[in-house]
């Protein structure tokens, strides 16, 4: 049995072509107090030093042999088979509690494989990638685990030098420190997953969080700007929530209208698929986000615009866009396997749409609410609430539903 005071770190890389760099990383992890668990994902060459799991072990995990993989003759397809084996091996090590952290090193090929491995590990498990394309547009957001750490492998494509040693040593300290200090989620109390934006836009969590905590729940509020929604959906797909309060659908709206500020195609799907009770409201779904530093899309040029900061800004949606959003929300919710209740706040769905604010559009809101009601069907139920989503009355209605569901045994509290 491993010493639990010294974290075991899975180290993945091609130990034939990156032997110097990986050996240096191993030494730094040892110096930081970690136990290296080396995994070689090479195909053609041989490692010059002993590894815990050889390329033959990885190939075997993929139900193949290294000879068969090498004979494929195409590096992309060959490394995808190695990725399959590496993922299975990492999953096995994790399930048997034999590793406390994961780190990988690579260029585009190694990063591609590393992303697959990191994605098989749960939220809260320390995961780190040293990459020549860290944070690059080459990496689509839907391939990045929500809690992934990355660092640029600067100046290290071939051989060691002072610059790349800086990256490698930082990474070694980070993964050992993370694995040593992490408080992994214990899920001792029933967990409520809630979505929102910052309090200047959506503020219902200010009322709901303390009230739900008094009822014995832990509350996790996810920032709905892309990666937050990915983390939210990941946990829902793992059935970690006792209840979902999904009151900010902006990421979903962004996806529907082609913005990169989204959480992928599975947003608004996982809780319903798992049968998790969910209360849903269309918070901020009258907006579409863009990067405020980028070129403004021509199709939104006649819409009202709000620059939230130098990173993100929002356009209001036209009536036809809002109808498309309403139909898409209803289509996703109507597939739910569990209890789903929709709340429709008639006086507004984000702070900037109040009277006197730049995105105030009562006719657009009325049109949206009407479209949403017409598309919802059983088993989904809904209420129209004559207040704004940020009003205390809206939170009170939410708590009324929660209490009824607790009493009826729909929510396990």
Image (cartoon, rainbow, N blue to C red):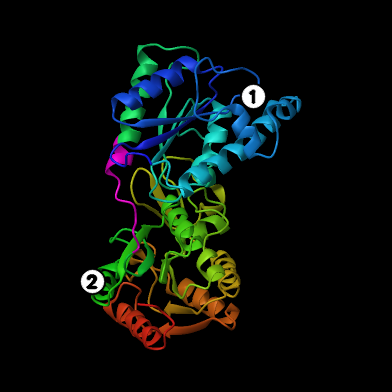
Residue 283, relative to residue 90: is it above or below?
below
How far is the residue under mark 1 from the one under mark 2?
54 Å
Q: Position of residue 45 (x, y in %)?
A: 62, 17
Q: Using the image as rendered, state which of residue 89 and residue 213 is in the foreground.
A: 89
Q: Badge 1 local density, few (<14 within 10 Å), some, or many (20+)?
A: many
**Percent position (x, y) of residue 134?**
46, 31
Q: Is residue 395 above or below residue 124?
A: below
Residue for badge 2: 210
Q: Nearer the viewer, residue 142 or 391?
A: 142
Q: Does residue 182 belong to the magenta stretch?
A: yes
First in sequence, mark 1 or 2: give its number: 1
Magenta stretch, residue numbers: 177-187
What x and y, as percent, mark residue 66?
A: 68, 27
Query: On the rendered structure, is 153 left or right of 89?
Result: left
Taking depth in this image into account, of 138 and 233 the one nearest to the observer is: 233
The answer to whether residue 127 is seen in the rendering is no
Based on the picture, tell me whether residue 386 belongs to the magenta stretch.
no
| Image mark count | 2
**Residue that carries the numbered disc 1 in the rendered image:** 43
Decide: marks 1, 2 in contact (CB < 8 A)? no
Tell me the quadrant of the picture where the N terminus can be found: top left
- Between tags 1 and 2, which lies in front? 1
Q: Secondary structure at mark 1?
A: loop
Q: In the rendered image of this protein, does residue 220 appear above or below residue 291?
A: below
- Check the image and name the residue furthest to the front: 1
In the displayed structure, 164 sits above or below 56; it is above
The quarter of the picture where the C terminus appears is bottom left
User: Residue at left 33%, top 79%?
Assistant: 394
Is residue 88 shown to the viewer in this render?
A: yes
């Amino acid at each position: 049995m491993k010493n639990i005071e010294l974290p075991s770190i899975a180290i993945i890389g091609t130990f034939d072509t990156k032997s110097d760099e990986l050996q240096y990383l191993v030494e730094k992890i040892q110096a930081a107090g970690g136990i290296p668990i080396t995994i070689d994902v090479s195909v053609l060459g041989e490692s010059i030093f002993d590894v815990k799991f050889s390329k033959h072990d990885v190939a075997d995990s993929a139900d193949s042999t290294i000879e068969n993989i090498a004979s494929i003759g195409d590096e992309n397809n060959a490394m995808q088979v190695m990725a399959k084996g590496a993922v299975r091996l990492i999953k096995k090590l994790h399930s048997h509690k034999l590793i406390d952290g994961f780190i990988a090193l690579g260029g585009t090929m190694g990063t591609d494989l590393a992303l697959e491995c990191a994605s098989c590990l749960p939220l809260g498990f320390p995961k780190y990638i040293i990459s020549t394309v860290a944070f690059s547009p080459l990496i689509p957001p839907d391939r990045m685990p929500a809690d992934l750490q990355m660092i640029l492998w600067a100046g290290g494509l071939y051989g060691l030098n002072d610059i790349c040693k800086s990256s490698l040593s930082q990474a070694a300290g980070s993964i050992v420190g993370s694995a040593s200090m992490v408080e992994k989620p214990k899920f001792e109390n029933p967990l409520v997953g809630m979505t929102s934006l910052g309090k200047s836009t959506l503020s219902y969590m200010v009322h709901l969080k303390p009230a739900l905590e008094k009822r014995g729940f832990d509350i996790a509020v996810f920032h709905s700007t892309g990666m937050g929604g990915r983390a939210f959906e990941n946990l829902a797909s793992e059935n970690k929530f006792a209840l979902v309060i999904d009151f900010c659908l902006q990421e979903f709206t962004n996806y529907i209208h082609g913005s990169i500020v989204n959480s992928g195609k599975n947003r608004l799907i996982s809780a319903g698929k798992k049968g998790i009770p969910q209360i849903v409201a269309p918070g901020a779904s009258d907006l579409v986000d863009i990067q405020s530093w980028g070129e403004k899309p021509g199709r939104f040029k006649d819409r009202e615009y709000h620059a939230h900061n130098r990173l993100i800004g929002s356009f209001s949606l036209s009536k036809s866009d809002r109808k498309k959003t309403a139909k898409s929300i209803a289509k996703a919710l109507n597939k739910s396997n569990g209890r789903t209740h929709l709340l429709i706040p008639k006086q507004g769905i984000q702070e900037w749409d109040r009277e006197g604010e730049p995105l105030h559009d009562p006719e657009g809101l009325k049109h949206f609410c009407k479209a949403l009601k017409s598309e919802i069907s059983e088993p989904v139920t809904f209420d129209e609430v004559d207040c704004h989503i940020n009003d205390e009355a809206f939170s009170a209605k939410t708590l009324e539903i929660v209490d009824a569901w607790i009493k009826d045994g729909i929510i396990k509290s």
